[in-house]
Image (cartoon, rainbow, N blue to C red):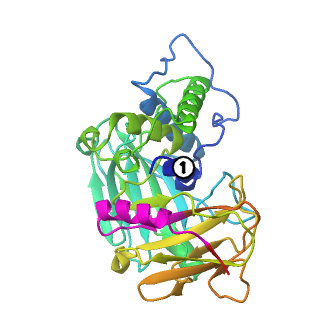
Amino acid sequence: MNKAILFACVSLLTLGCTKASSPDGGSSPVTSESPSVSMENYVVAETDWYFSAQQARAPVNTFTHNDPVSIDNQDVIRSNRDVMYSLAIVDISEGATLTVPERDAFQIIHVMDENHLSHFVIRSGESKTITPDDVTLGNHVYLLARTKITDDMEESLAAQRALEISANSANPYESKGFSEDEVVAFREKLVADFIRGDVVIIEHKSFGETMDDVEPVSYVYAAAVGWGGLPAHTAQYLAAVKNQGATNCQKWTVPKPDLQWEQGGFFSLTTYDSEGWIVEDNFYIDHNRMQDDGDSYTMYLNCPDQAANVIVQEDWTGIVRFYLPRNEEQMIEFIDVVRDIPVEAL
């Protein structure tokens, strides 16, 4: 579990883990009134950075819909091909209702407050009215909606556009005034600590509804390397496939995960080059295209005669993403088992 979140970070949010820049393209000025960033307020400062960037991108209570990731459309490393993102800042000071229309495939609105706490994950067919009493800080929330891309792209795009925000007020979000350069520098320090192994992130204790649900160190460091991550009850990740990297014809067979299939649960493998970029057109496979063996699924690598095949280059990397586990703790154990299943040469 220790380093899975690092590789999942930029796959969770299209804004994540890139070099920061202010919404107007310059650097935020440092003033005598800018609060200093510290371990105690870093998560709020990092979250303010995301809130402010989205506020500059679109008016409050308005979604921006991102296009599907492809070889020609990847703004960050290890982009997530599973879903299309929709982002918004919502004013909840007078109450706001968020709705995900009925859909057969996976679709959610992930709601985060100014403390980067995940108060709600609204699923297909659900509506939720949110007020300031429902969050731990502020009068605004950040929405990170995820719409699974199906074989019917027109349906997927229509589902994305059908997401609804109905707010009773439209006060813009106001930045808390942290220096952007200081936020970025602090983020990079935390990421470096993690990469060196100075800290261990407990992924399933990184994102929660209240501070009682998170482990304090994981909460802070996860905001640096994986801001916007879903709670473990909604998604979990495997960042590396054992024996990955070769380019000969191979296969990988894994046990069938216990997901909420009837609610749109699914899992997938997305492949990248050694630096985390998409370099092939056929780089992604979800369980619908894998070979269903009954109690397991098989996927092939560089085996063009196989239908359940993806193409990889030398020293390839990959992320397996599991959505809607039926049992959070059992899925954590399941991923540890899958981690030790090697890719087999054919």
335 inside magenta stretch: yes
Which percent across, then down, holds residue 67?
63, 64
Which percent across, then down, holds residue 93?
31, 41
Q: Which residue is mark 1?
A: 9
Question: Residue, x 46% and y 69% (percent of image)?
Answer: 162
Left or right of 185 in this view: 258: left
What is the residue that sits farthest to the top in this orientation? Answer: 32
Closer to us: 221 or 51: 221
- Give above or below for 10 relative to 285: above
State which quarter of the image contains the C terminus: bottom right
Q: Quadrant of residue 72?
A: bottom right
Question: Residue, x 51% and y 17% (percent of image)?
Answer: 34
Left or right of 125 in this view: 88: right
Q: Mark 1: give few (<14), some (14-19) or many (20+) Cα within 10 Å.
A: many
- Give above or below for 75 relative to 160: above
Tally the numbered discs: 1
Secondary element at image label 1: helix
Which percent across, then down, holds residue 6?
54, 47
Closer to us: 88 or 317: 317
Q: Mark 1 belongs to which amino acid? A: Cys
**Residue 285 seen from this side:** yes
Left or right of 232 in this view: 81: right
Closer to us: 269 or 33: 269
- Give above or below for 176 relative to 131: above
**Residue 164 seen from this side:** no
Which percent across, then down, holds residue 232?
36, 56
Q: Quadrant of residue 133?
A: top left
Per the rendered image, the range of residues in magenta is: 320-343
Question: Residue, x 53% and y 71% (percent of image)?
Answer: 268
196 inside magenta stretch: no
